[in-house]
Image: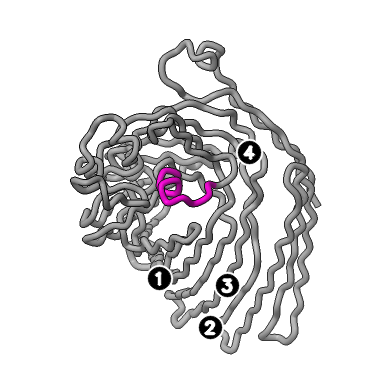
Amino acid sequence: MEHRREDYADVYDALSESGAVAGSAGNTAGGRRKVSAAYAEWYLPVAQDFDFTLAARYDRYDDYGSDVSPKLSLRWQPLDNLTLRASVGEGFRAPALPYVHSQRAFSAEPISDYRTCVATGFSPVLCGGDANGDNIADGPENEEEVAYQVDSYQTGNPDLLSEHSRQFSVGLAWDPLDWFNLTLDYYRIQIDDRIRLISFRELVGLDNAGQPLPEHTWVKRRSNGSISEIQTAFVNEGKLDTRGLDLNLRASGNLAWGRVDSWLQVARVLEYTVVDGDTRKDPLGWVTQPKLRATWRNAWSRGDFNLAWNINYIGSQQNPAEVPPYGFITSGPGVRVGSYTTHDLNLTWNAPWNGSLSLGVNNAGDRYPELVGYDNQPWNFHLYDAYGRTVYFRVSQKF
């Protein structure tokens, strides 16, 4: 059993809050919650080569409610060097305190909207319609339309609930040789009531289509149809369904010139589908959603010296010729990002005083990400960094 209290505070200066400072960086916010949980697990050996485990966890949050997470795991070892395994379970993710308690914060986001564009004085063609003002798209606008800034706000959602998931996996662990073993696992994860921030672009699209907007969000218009204000928030909306394969290959052995260990991890996503309202999105393989990622770790050791060489790989991505206006896909049609590989090196000396000295370099090839814009940034910060070659020296001491 466990019990904890979480406190959140994000304090801004009074001048920024009052609007005396140009621009906006947020607003003061704070909140707290108490969480109590109970967990139990039963290991049941049915036979010498077969067992299963039952587990369950109950969590109680004093701000939104409770969740129960059950799990069943099976393990069968038909051979000494072969193990088959499977598991099924449910989970949840509680809303973060900033998502719930953040105060309304001002921004001035660029928005494309036909009615506002025409009211501003641009021609219907430039705004996305034809010469007569017809053929107005009801969804989010294309890249050719005029963008302009509007008063926009982001706020917390006190009615936000947890999102829930269902997981299933099946796999094997095989040791065909004394110096080599592998594991292969298939998984599927489904998430309901996803916690996500509705983009301003999506809100404008819903408003143009006459569809209801989620709670605590709105698009306000003037009498001439132009947008005067727009507000967004985190909401429970949509589903996510993903499945894939995880492969691990490990080899190790003692050679005349030292011990060598090698470990290859490969993750292949087979499906990644997001459903928001009536919109189904299948962005797997598109920019920001690579199908393949891999890491190859290699280590050589002899005496007090260890040398490590790690290779990190992110697969290429490419948008189709026609990209639907999905809120989280911000790069254009046909855009391609090539594969990305970096090399990390490290040399460690294990000192006789129960310590160690390490000299290493991350991204030894000084590889930088391609400048393909994402989320108003010059590249995708979620996948890549731009630190370039980073050399470090580390001293460690154990007591």
Give the numbered dot on residue 100: 4
Nearest to viewer (mark 2 / mark 1)? 1
**Residue under pointer 1:** 270
> Mark 2–mark 1 contact, CB under 8 Å?
no
Mark 3 → mark 1, Cα distance in angstroms: 15 Å
Q: Spatial distance from mark 3 to mark 2, Cα to Cα?
A: 24 Å
Under mark 4, the amino acid is: Val
Q: Residue 290: horizontal and vertical position, in percent? A: 34, 59
What is the three-letter code of the residue carrying label 3? Phe
Position in image of residue 92 (x %, y %): 64, 57
- 51 left or right of 1? left
The numbered dot on residue 81 is 2
Mark 2 or mark 4: whose residue is earlier in sequence: 2
Query: What whole-number distance in Å separates the C-alpha atoms at marks 3 and 4?
Result: 30 Å
Residue at the extreme bottom of the image, as rendered: 78
- Residue 121, picture quadrant: top left
Rendered residue at 64%/45% (across/down): 160
Image x and y of residue 347, in percent? 36, 46
* Left or right side of 137 for 26: right
Residue beneath label 3, please?
Answer: 168
Q: Earlier in the sequence, mark 3 or mark 1?
A: 3
Badge 3 local density, few (<14 within 10 Å), some, or many (20+)?
some
Quadrant location of the C terminus? top right
Is 373 rendered above or below residue 342? above
Q: Earlier in the sequence, mark 1 or mark 4?
A: 4
- Nearest to viewer (mark 3 / mark 4): 4
Secondary structure found at label 2: loop
Which stretch is magenta? Answer: 203-213
Which one is closest to the eye, mark 2 or mark 4? 4
**Point 49% across, 80% down: residue:** 174
Q: CA distance from mark 2 to mark 4?
A: 50 Å
